[in-house]
Image: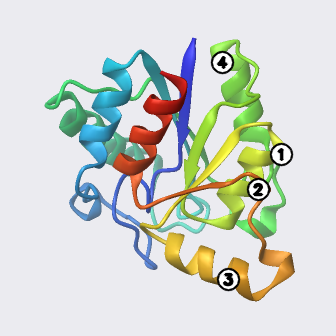
């Protein structure tokens, strides 16, 4: 089985410093839904791994989070695409859970759910914590320059403790990353 793991905010949809709190705030990044459809057409399954601390902070409830994901899935279906599974961490960083990226709990759950070793599985994010979790789980980390991506790249050049994991691919956006994945892995 071929699998790709995606972060949500800043990769699939526009990010917000104030969180995505309702379906109307969920706005896809240009070309991202087409890119997911291309992955599906190329035989890839797609999993989303997203930190959603707004749940723990009381900014969003589970029904609203589900509504946001329903909107994402509806818009994707209009283009013939699908997300096979969505994994999320509802915890704030001070809760010290195992699932919140940069920890690898969500990655391990994805591996179990799909019965797949994650070694080399392409995993796309816009923040250092995404890449750290992906790398620690054995995935191929890919940084997109949408969302927090440009700031993540700039910070990695300023400080050794913010360095990108070894062998991180740099791509302009999700569409660019998908082109590279399909070209290199078929």
User: Residue 135 or 112: which is nearer the viewer?
Assistant: 135
Mark in front: 2 vs 4: 2
Relative height, residue 39 to residue 132 (above, below): above
- Location of residue 78 (image quadrant): top left
- Residue position marked by numbered label 3 in the rendering: 155
The mark tally for this picture is 4
The answer to which of marks 1 and 4 sits earlier in the sequence is 4
Q: Residue at x 52, y 69 (%)?
A: 149
- Residue position marked by numbered label 2 in the rendering: 132
- Residue position marked by numbered label 4 in the rendering: 113
Q: Residues within 10 Å of mark 4 (few under 14, many from 20)?
A: few
- Residue position marked by numbered label 1 in the rendering: 136
Q: Secondary structure at mark 2?
A: helix
Q: Secondary structure at mark 4?
A: helix
Query: What separation in Å lies between label 3 and label 4 (alpha carbons)?
Result: 34 Å
The answer to which of marks 3 and 2 sits earlier in the sequence is 2
Query: What separation in Å lies between label 3 and label 2 (alpha carbons)?
Result: 14 Å
The answer to which of marks 1 and 3 sits earlier in the sequence is 1
**Residue 55 appears at what percent x and percent y?**
54, 58
Q: Residues within 10 Å of mark 1 (few under 14, many from 20)?
A: some
The answer to which of marks 3 and 4 sits earlier in the sequence is 4
Question: Which residue of the protein is positioned furthest toward the bottom in this rendering?
Answer: 158
């Amino acid at each position: 089985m071929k699998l790709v793991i995606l972060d949500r905010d800043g990769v699939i949809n526009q990010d917000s410093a104030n969180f995505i709190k309702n379906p109307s705030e969920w706005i896809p990044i240009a070309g991202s839904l087409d890119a997911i459809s291309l992955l599906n057409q190329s035989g890839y399954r797609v999993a989303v791994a997203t930190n959603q601390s707004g749940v723990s902070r009381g900014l969003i409830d589970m029904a609203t989070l589900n509504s946001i994901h329903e909107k994402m899935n509806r818009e994707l279906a209009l283009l013939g695409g699908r997300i096979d599974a969505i994994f999320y961490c509802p915890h704030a960083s001070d809760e010290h859970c195992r699932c919140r990226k940069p920890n690898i709990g969500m990655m391990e759950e994805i591996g179990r759910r799909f019965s797949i070793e994650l070694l080399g599985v392409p995993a796309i994010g816009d923040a250092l914590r995404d890449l750290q979790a992906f790398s620690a789980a054995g995935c191929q980390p890919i940084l997109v320059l949408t969302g927090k991506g440009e700031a993540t790249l700039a910070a990695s050049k300023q400080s050794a403790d913010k360095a990108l994991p070894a062998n991180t691919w740099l791509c302009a956006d999700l569409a660019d990353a998908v082109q590279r994945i399909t070209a290199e892995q078929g």
